[in-house]
Image (tube, rainbow, N blue to C red):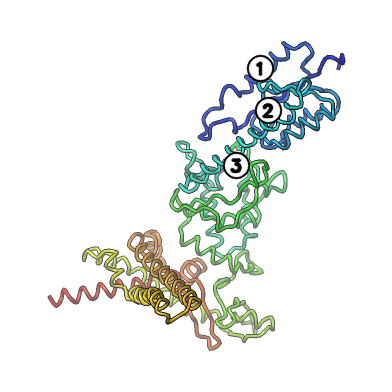
Amino acid sequence: MNNKNIYDTGLYLRLSRDDADVDGSKKTESNSISSQRDILRAYVQSHEDLQIYDIYIDDGYSGANFERPEFQRMMADVRAGKVNCVLVKDLSRFGRDYIEAGRFIQKTFPALNVRFIAVTDGFDSLYADKTDSSLILPIKNFVNDSYCRDISMKVKAQQKVKRMEGKCISAFTVYGYKKNPEDKNSLVVDEYAADIVRKIFAWKIAGMSLGAIAEKLNATGILSPMEYKKSLGMKYYTGFEGSSTAKWAAASVKRILVNPVYIGTMVQGKQEKVNYKVKKRIDKPQEEWIYVKNTHKAIISEVEFLTVQDLLKYDGRASSNTDTANLFSGVLICADCKAPMIKRVNSYKGKKKVFYICQTKNKSMGCSRHSIEEETLKRIVFKEIKKYLELMASYSEVAEYLEQMNVNYEQVVEYDSQIATLQTEYNRYYGLKSSLFADLKEGLIDKKEFDEFHNLYERKCSELENAIAAQKKIIKDMFQNGVAAKSQLEKIKETLELQELDRELLVTTVRKIYVHEDKRLEIEFRFSNEMDKLAVMSQMCHEKTSMQEVI
């Protein structure tokens, strides 16, 4: 400071998205950086006791808090004695948190002997009286804070609407997709990255561990998702970053394998800000995430995705001499204790015998061996899979016949005895629930008994409603997509030509194989619910054919 009557002035300018309309329209010219600069310079020129020391500009920073780089630089100069006057266009440019703004203006600045001026609000701490400082200033700061809170709420509401509509509102897309150049809220497939995603799913289905997949990607020089985005010129940052050059890791592979976005489902709203004043984001519980199906083209079939989710629950170790899991890893289960079966190899006179035993028994923690030879297991399972696939492939013939007979979804639902049984059970409980009011009125039951029975019948009705809806959905999906997608049916027909059981065929067809102590196998196939409905449709076709023959 050259003279005690001349104030070395810091011009503070701020602009953020808070100053735009909620729909994202252009920021108002009155609040633009250039406009603020012109107003403040003109004010300094018209006041001989002010001289500009420096100009501090936070462009793109919210006024909800004071964690802004240029504001912090200005405060460092203030505390160093380089600046003893802070000049802003109005109080809202200084900040919208009325508590913090008030603390700076009424406590911090006076303690540091710093003059504060808000031009268009007509506030100058050098000349402000008690009314200005204790009443008008807090009210204006409170109004600015309320404005910031209101804008935050409106933006959140609009973002939620967009999420519910399945519109992508994130700045970056997940690996395998890119923003549609014609619509920034929709996704299109990035073919290069999508091909890597397909390989990751295929490798997992083939039995590779997450770590082995990551090692293979790194060994072949494939860029990790973060490095790939950087290579495209994106200013991308992730909290998972651990080194200057990010590599594939088991965690990054798993994030891809569990993400429903790859089957065409948009998933958003996983995090939220603590409040409008704090930038920190917290994770939301998964049940609060927003899922919208069929918003974009799928990279992975639903069958492959669901298969991988099952495998991840029993992610067995890779065998010692390969980077893939054993054939039955994650699929073979002890029927009694429900623990995974583990592979064992015995060598006798140069011959190897491979078999599986219960993991619980192997650890001497109870149960029994449930031992079964691998070759016997492969032979039985392969035979059952072939029979199952032959039946599944026959769906195309049933579907064609139903179409020729003009059989529709409603007719199949009406014919389905399982749905009819559930509906009869629902009607019974609904009738019991309705009769409770009359029983209470006539004194046959008291209020406590009424509440207990009403809750019981209400719960039963709800469970049955859900069960009926699930059965109807299976039939509806079959009319729309078949037992599996058309591409899957073609794959099934190709599979019928195979002569040996492999990992891909096993895990995409079978969910679990339960081994009993007497070596009896219980196979839980995928699409078992659909196959039950197929039996209903086949019976319906048979009856209609018989009726036509009689006529």
Type of amino acid at the residue the image marks with label 3? Lys
Disc 3 and disc 1: Cα gap in Å?
A: 41 Å
Q: Position of residue 324 (x, y in %)?
A: 60, 65
Of the residues under marks 2 and 1, which one precedes in the sequence? 1
Q: Secondary structure at mark 2?
A: helix
Left or right: residue 155 compared with residue 60: left
Near mark 1 (Cα within 10 A), the count class, few <14, some 14-19 or many ≥20, is: some
Of the residues under marks 3 and 1, which one precedes in the sequence? 1
Location of the N terminus by quadrant is top right
* Proximity of marks 2 and 1: CB atoms separated by less than 8 Å: no
Vertical position of residue 24 compared to residue 172: above or below: above
Of the residues under marks 2 and 3, which one precedes in the sequence? 2
Which residue was labeled with disc 1? 39
Q: Secondary structure at mark 3?
A: helix
Residue drawn at (24%, 63%) of the image: 403
Q: Nearer the viewer, residue 422 or 528?
A: 422
Which mark is nearer the camera, 3 or 1? 1
Q: Position of residue 148 (x, y in %)?
A: 62, 36
Near mark 3 (Cα within 10 A), the count class, few <14, some 14-19 or many ≥20, is: some
Q: Is residue 410 visible?
A: yes
Vertical position of residue 478 compared to residue 547: above or below: above
Residue drawn at (46%, 62%) of the image: 303
Q: Secondary structure at mark 1?
A: helix
Q: Nearer the viewer, residue 312 or 82?
A: 82
Which residue was labeled with disc 3? 229
Type of amino acid at the residue the image marks with label 1? Ile
Type of amino acid at the residue the image marks with label 2? Leu
Q: Quadrant of residue 353?
A: bottom right
Q: Position of residue 523 (x, y in %)?
A: 47, 77
Which residue was labeled with disc 2? 91
Which mark is nearer the camera, 2 or 1? 2
